[in-house]
């Protein structure tokens, strides 16, 4: 995953200045049909019962992985083809922290449920 400019600034402020940096206290996984980038943007899924899902992480070495499985609500309509995910600090609105392309894009149609098994969402800091 790549970090957003907003989050990179938070990390640099914490590491290399005497200013305090406010760290997120909650994380939420978002789905995208068009890629976000370092400044945000992209096209997040909306409607059809879609909602960001709360996610917690376990840290091992330089990698954070989702602690438990995530399950998005059953789609009541087409989400389109999900190509990317993003981690935010809020259930809606908020700041994009990190984002990545899915290994394989996935079309989500009415009745589909997108699941992310525990340990399949990895964020690495190199």
Image (tube, rainbow, N blue to C red):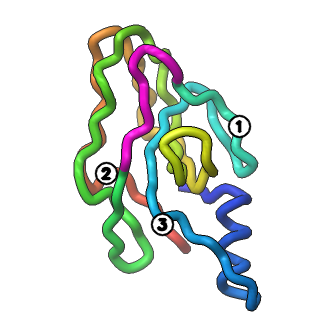
Residue at the image position 43 percent from the left and 14 percent from the top: 48
- Packing grade of label 3 (10 A; few <14, some 14-19, many >=20) is some
Mark-to-mark CA distance, 2 and 1: 24 Å
Point out the residue furthest to the bottom here. Answer: 18
The picture places residue 78, in percent across and down from the top left corner, at 43, 10
In which quadrant of the rendered image does the C terminus lie? bottom right
Find out whether residue 52 is within the magenta segment.
yes
On residue 49, the disc is none
Residue at numbered disc 2: 120
Magenta stretch bounds: 46-54
> What residue does disc 3 label?
124
Decide: is 2 above or below 46. below
Tag 2 near tag 1, CB within 8 Å:
no
Label 1 crowd bin: few (<14), some (14–19), many (20+), radius 10 Å: few
Q: Nearer the viewer, residue 57 or 108?
A: 57
Q: Is residue 113 magenta?
A: no
Camera-near label (2 vs 1) is 1
Q: Residue at x 63, y 28 (%)?
A: 43
**Residue holding disc 1:** 41
Look at 53% across and 45% down and name the residue there.
86
Residue 101 in the image: x percent, y percent? 52, 41
């Amino acid at each position: 995953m790549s970090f957003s400019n907003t989050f990179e600034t938070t990390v640099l402020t914490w590491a290399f200045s005497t200013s305090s940096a406010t760290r997120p206290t909650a994380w939420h996984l978002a789905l995208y049909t068009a890629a976000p980038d370092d400044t945000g943007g992209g096209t997040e899924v909306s409607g059809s019962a879609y909602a960001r899902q709360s996610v917690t992480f376990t840290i091992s070495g330089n990698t954070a992985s989702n602690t438990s499985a995530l399950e998005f609500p059953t789609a009541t309509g087409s989400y389109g083809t999900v190509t990317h995910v993003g981690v935010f600090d809020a259930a809606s609105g908020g700041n994009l922290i990190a984002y990545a392309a899915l290994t394989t894009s996935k079309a989500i149609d009415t009745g589909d449920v997108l699941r992310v098994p525990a340990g399949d969402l990895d964020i690495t800091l190199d």
